[in-house]
Image (cartoon, helix red, strand yellow):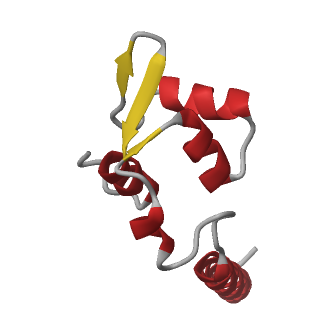
């Protein structure tokens, strides 16, 4: 292969490489847009989500100290799940003998993502 042929060969390789890179960039951009749409859809769905048994004004209706049955009703979960959640120590609770007491403030903070208790 003479020098001119080598130059032409390298130019073709460069053009091919540019086209390949451009296609990859377009695919990545498409993936990003798809993920952004998916995330936006998820945010929209979550903003419309309401917990079973809880409406906007009902926090004030909850007792200041709740029991596992209250947690069960608020979250719409079973008794075993309620106890597993409580025993996971994700929010503060007090055990008095066999009785479990959950401060409303601690539970609401946990539920809203503010683990301040």
| Residue 84 quadrant | top right
Q: How many numbered circles does the render carry? A: 0
Q: Position of residue 11 (x, y in %)?
A: 66, 88
Q: Residue furthest toward the left?
A: 116
In the image, is 23 to the left or to the right of 101? right
- Residue drawn at point x = 66 percent, y = 88 percent: 22
In the image, is 9 to the left or to the right of 50? right
| Residue 35 quadrant | bottom right
Q: Position of residue 3 (x, y in %)?
A: 64, 81
As rendered, which of 9 and 70 lies closer to the eye?
A: 70
- Residue drawn at point x = 70 percent, y = 79 percent: 38
In the image, is 61 to the left or to the right of 49? left
Q: Residue furthest toward the top?
A: 97
Q: Position of residue 67 (x, y in %)?
A: 50, 36
Relative height, residue 99 to residue 101 (above, below): above
In the image, is 20 to the left or to the right of 100? right
Q: Position of residue 1 (x, y in %)?
A: 76, 73
The quadrant the C terminus occupies is: top left
Q: Is residue 116 visible in the rendered structure shown here?
A: yes
Q: Is residue 7 visible in the rendered structure shown here?
A: no
Relative height, residue 61 to residue 8 (above, below): above
As rendered, which of 101 and 86 lies closer to the eye?
A: 101
- Residue drawn at point x = 65 percent, y = 87 percent: 33
As rendered, which of 83 and 3 lies closer to the eye?
A: 83
- Residue drawn at point x = 50 percent, y = 71 percent: 58
């Amino acid at each position: 292969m003479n020098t001119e042929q080598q130059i032409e060969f390298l130019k073709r390789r460069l053009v091919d490489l540019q086209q390949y890179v451009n296609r990859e960039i377009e695919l990545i951009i498409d993936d990003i847009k798809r993920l952004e749409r998916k995330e936006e859809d998820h945010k929209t769905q979550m903003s419309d989500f309401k917990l079973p048994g809880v409406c906007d004004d009902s926090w004030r209706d909850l007792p200041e100290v709740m029991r596992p049955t209250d947690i069960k009703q608020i979250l719409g979960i079973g008794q075993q799940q309620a106890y597993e959640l409580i025993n996971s120590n994700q929010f503060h609770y007090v055990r008095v003998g066999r009785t479990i007491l959950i401060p409303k403030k601690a539970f609401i903070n946990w539920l809203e993502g503010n683990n301040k208790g």
